[in-house]
Image (cartoon, rainbow, N blue to C red):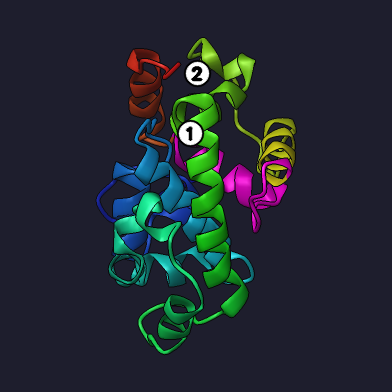
Amino acid sequence: MIIGDDGRARCRWGDAPPLYRAYHDDEWGRPVADDVALFEKLSLEGFQAGLSWLTILKKRENFRRAFCGFDFHRLAGWGEPEIAARLEDPGIVRHRAKIAAVITNARAAVELIDAEGSLAAFVWRFEPEAQAAGSAAGTPEPRSESAASRTLARELKRRGWCFVGPTTVHSFLQAMGLVNEHVCGCHVRSAVEADRAGFIRPG
């Protein structure tokens, strides 16, 4: 934990620079049930592999523009011409396999929704039971993956998704509020726990 120049305690990673502080305070850990937002985050986590999240965060609006707001129904129809165009876009991470993965995963997302009703309903089935009750007890331990992320990653891969390893998926679970891993003492932790307690799980 760290005390910022505003006097507030935060998770050490979330105090600076200002872009990180805003992301930490206002987004990270808040529960999300919107399919497009969930797909966007999984896509961006895939791009983040091997890079810093700050790099991706700085380019997030460029990614949204380049990938049509991560409208996966639209992206599912893309092919080589769209990949080639993104490889010429300096505003994003120009990595062919990661760009192609967004299209592959968009098609897989459409199939998953046809089978399961929504991406949100599917993803939230993997919320760890210990956190479902909204308990704020205990101090989250730093970790790069979890039993839930390994299970969800395995299931996504079985359904044709790529760039969704357990570390990537754990970062997704943290960010989308399926777990609350703000450290105890962080001024955001209790607010996130309240959001999770009042959140209606999709089903």
Per the rendering, the mark at residue 72 is none
> Would you say 130 lies left or right of 33 here?
right
The answer to whether residue 178 is visible is no
Q: Residues within 10 Å of mark 2 (few under 14, many from 20)?
A: some
**Image location of residue 64, percent across then percent down:** 31, 64
> Would you say 133 lies left or right of 28 here?
right
Per the rendering, the mark at residue 136 is 2
Q: Nearer the viewer, residue 76 or 161?
A: 76
Per the rendering, the mark at residue 113 is 1
Q: Nearer the viewer, residue 26 or 152?
A: 152
**Image location of residue 184, percent across then percent down:** 50, 30
Magenta segment: does it hold 97?
Answer: no
Q: Quadrant of the C terminus?
A: top left
Q: Residues within 10 Å of mark 1 (few under 14, many from 20)?
A: some
Q: At 36% across and 45% down in the image, what residue appears?
A: 37
Q: Mostly what secondary structure, the magenta segment?
A: loop
First along the sequence among labels 1 and 2: 1
**Image location of residue 92, percent across then percent down:** 41, 77
Number of numbered tags placed on the structure image:
2
**Image location of residue 24, percent across then percent down:** 37, 48
Q: At 54% across and 36% down in the image, what residue appears?
A: 112
Q: Nearer the viewer, residue 180 or 157?
A: 157
| Amino acid type assigned to the residue bearing label 1 in the image | Ile
| Amino acid type assigned to the residue bearing label 2 in the image | Ala
Most extreme residue toward the left is 6
Magenta segment: does it hold 173?
Answer: yes
* Element at label 2: loop
Q: At 28% across and 69% down in the image, what residue appears?
A: 65
Real-space Cα separation, disc 1 to disc 2, in angstroms: 32 Å
Magenta region, residue range: 158-185
